[in-house]
Image (cartoon, helix red, strand yellow):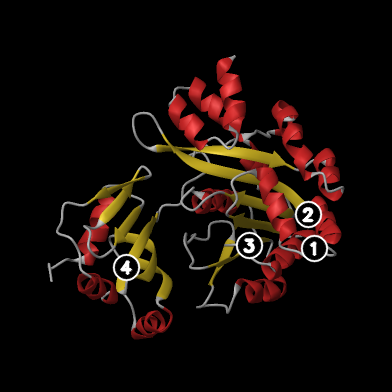
Amino acid sequence: MAGYDIKKLLQSVVAHKASDLHLVSRTEPQIRLDGRLKAVNLPKLTGDDIEEMCYSLITEKQKQEFEEHSELDFALLLPGIGRFRANYYKTMGDMAAAFRTIPIHIPSLDDLNAPDVYKRLVKREKGLILVTGPTGSGKSTTLAAMLNEINLNENKHILTAEDPVEFIHENKKAVFSHRGVGEDTASFGAALKYALRQDPDVILIGEMRDKVTISAGLTAAETGHLVFGTLHTSSAPGTINRIIDVFSGDEQPQIRAMIASSLVAVVSQMLLPKLGGGRVAASEILIVNHAIANLIREDKVHQIYSQMQLGQGDTGMQTQTQALIKFLKDGKISKETAIQYANKPDELKNFLGK
């Protein structure tokens, strides 16, 4: 045993402002800084090293769950160090772990330099707002800042269903009921089924990954609640297709009608390496207006993108290409980064050519 101290390791992750710590056997501990992995200057780990460190952080019950399923997801609070989302798993028979830091200080929309339209969106009384993007694209942070905006300004009951609970909000004007899947409720579906009896004004669904959760989210949005949810999709129109595709062909017309009437906005974001260090969030923003609702209803989702290109100034909409061009003009990212992360590289190159 190399005598590792997991708490010291996690403390150094926070001190370095790294987003993640990876413990995998036959390699040194690795941290993710500004989106890139970097080995920590320590000896290579064995499966036994990792097991000894990781078991020191969990309860007997969690240990049994891990040994039974070879997977364990949980949130961890280390006083004086920070909060983490942890995942334990197996690789080649050895235990491995990934820790993601969760900031204890909840950022405001201003801290994130979020587009102004976000403040307008969170004032809505009802409807569905989706924040999407790949893993590690800052979805949870954006959602936490949006809920924080409501918390600062409105007396509302905010119910969250997450796996695990990430950001813990202090009640300012709003009252939060944080529910962890597996601890406080059996599943996202169960949490949503009972949510409507808990008199929420705002509901956050950690992940809308299946038919039950998506249906319940749409119903809650239709019945007068403001619902926030996340999906792992990389473009706004792609998000709408992903939701529709979860349902069978004969159910799709009804689901399109529900989306058309209840969807307020889709924000698809990606974190890009910033010139001079750090990262910056490029957001594609779709705001559902009358024209877009009609396209959804009539199964013409493929035409939404051109509507987004048109609806700039007055609506607050933007395509990912427009977000990238703005960052390039402001000198925030390099041309190579813009092309590497672009959803539509040809469109971006066309712009750059002009």
Report the amino acid beneath label 2.
Ile
Mark 3 burial class by Cα count in 10 Å: few <14, some 14-19, many 20+: many
Q: Do the residues labelled 2 and 3 touch (CB within 8 Å)?
A: no
Mark 1 burial class by Cα count in 10 Å: few <14, some 14-19, many 20+: few
Q: Mark 4 points at which residue?
A: 96
Q: Return the residue nearer the eye: 143 or 335.
A: 335
Q: Return the residue nearer the eye: 226 or 317.
A: 317
Name which residue lies at 75% across and 51% down. 263
Quarter holding the C terminus?
top right
- Gap in angstroms between the C-alphas marked 2 and 4: 40 Å
- Gap in angstroms between the C-alphas marked 3 and 1: 18 Å
Rendered image: mark on residue 223 = 1
- Look at discs 3 and 4 and give the one toward the viewer: 4
- Look at discs 3 and 1 and give the one toward the viewer: 3
Q: Are marks 2 and 4 in contact (CB under 8 Å)?
A: no
Report the amino acid beneath label 4.
Ala
Q: Return the residue nearer the eye: 249 or 15.
A: 249
- Gap in angstroms between the C-alphas marked 1 and 2: 13 Å
Corner quadrant of residue 87: bottom left
Mark 4 burial class by Cα count in 10 Å: few <14, some 14-19, many 20+: many
Q: Mark 3 points at which residue?
A: 208
Q: Is residue 287 left or right of residue 280?
A: right
Return the x and y of residue 1 as percentages of the image width and height.
13, 71
